[in-house]
Amino acid sequence: MGETGSVSRQAVLDDLLLKTSRTFALSIPRLPEPLRCEVTVAYLLFRIADTLEDATEWSTSRKLEELERMAQLLRDPDPAGSDRLASAWTADPPLDHEGCRELLGQTGAVVEAMTDLGDAACGLVRYHTLRTIECMAGFVRRSDKKRLLQLATLKDLQAYCYAVAGIVGEMLTELFLLECRELQPASVALRGSAVQFGEALQLVNILKDSASDAVEGRRYLPPGVSLKKVFALARKDIEGARGYIDTLQQSGAPRGLVEFTALPVLLARATLDRVEDQGPGAKLTRDEVRQMNERLAAALDAGTAAVPPLN
């Protein structure tokens, strides 16, 4: 693809990112190339899979069929197959979210972008996306006759978080290690906390969205587990994520990579406090997000911790 075509496709991917994720639309553009392109493509593929898993308008069997079709497309990318899937998904959309519906319609562009990544990056993105699709399908199979999913224990909740976010942490870590040689000496430490990095963000989202998720048939919070324990697990994971970011900083990671990982963790920690105080649905204001951005920039300018420890 020529330079003009590449720029045009990147603009399409950036627009899809903006329409499907407020947080990652803020953080992904900070990454240096080629990580920015790789992570954009990976995020959008995971978002497509997540949309198929949520699929409030589809039966359980239909969800499983479409997840398998996506997996097959990733194993054997085919422009005609991408177009057929995109047409079927947009004609009978799985849920009522305009941004996600538009993303499904651009499945071909996202898959094509994946195949145009370097061989190693493409292999990592494909492998980890297939892993999460397989894990998601396992949870979809557990839905009852009314298409309701209820997680049963704290370990069950962690297993779900791993399926949809812990794997993301592992994939991101491998991409970082692939593109940033200075991180190689810290590979063991980074891989050791990669899952906590992903799990922390997912647990905060589950706590924040628990009321709206329940209305749509997704009850991720186990009924026999106190909210206090879930909040405690989320805080433990955020501390692990803070350690992950400290390792990146101490290893000389590019500033944009540190910003990309630190901003979502800062937002998650502040959101967790807000939800614990005000209940599900509580959010940070735009002004609070702006101030957090400014504090992060000031910390990096000063050479201090991007995510400072709690007092």
Image (cartoon, grey):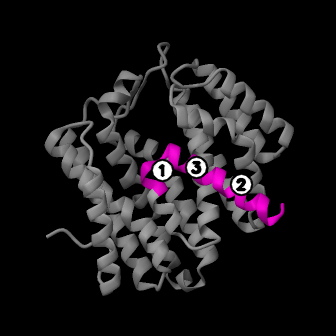
- Looking at the rendering, the stretch of residues picked out in magenta corresponds to 1-25
Q: Nearer the viewer, mark 1 or mark 2?
A: 2
Instruction: First in sequence, mark 1 or 3: give its number.
Output: 3
Marks 1 and 2 sit apart, C-alpha to C-alpha, by 26 Å
Instruction: First in sequence, mark 2 or 3: give its number.
Output: 2
| For the residues bearing labels 1 and 2, Cβ distance under 8 angstroms | no
- Label 3: state its secondary structure: helix
Q: With respect to residue 94, does 68 lie above or below?
A: below
Main SS of residues in magenta = helix
Q: Residue at x 48, y 50 (%)?
A: 165
Find disc 1 in the rendering and name its residue. 165
User: As shown in the figure, which amino acid type bears the numbered disc 1?
Assistant: Ala
Residue 149: image location, x then y, percent: 44, 26
Find disc 2 in the rendering and name its residue. 9
Drawn side of residue 124 relative to residue 166, left or right: right
Q: With respect to residue 194, does 158 lie above or below?
A: above
Drawn side of residue 114 relative to residue 15, left or right: right
Residue 37 sits in quarter: bottom right
User: As shown in the figure, which amino acid type bears the numbered disc 2?
Assistant: Arg
> Which quadrant: the C terminus?
bottom left
Residue 244: image location, x then y, percent: 40, 71
Task: Name the disc covering residue 15, or none.
Answer: 3
Residue 12 seen? yes
Instruction: First in sequence, mark 1 or 2: give its number.
Output: 2
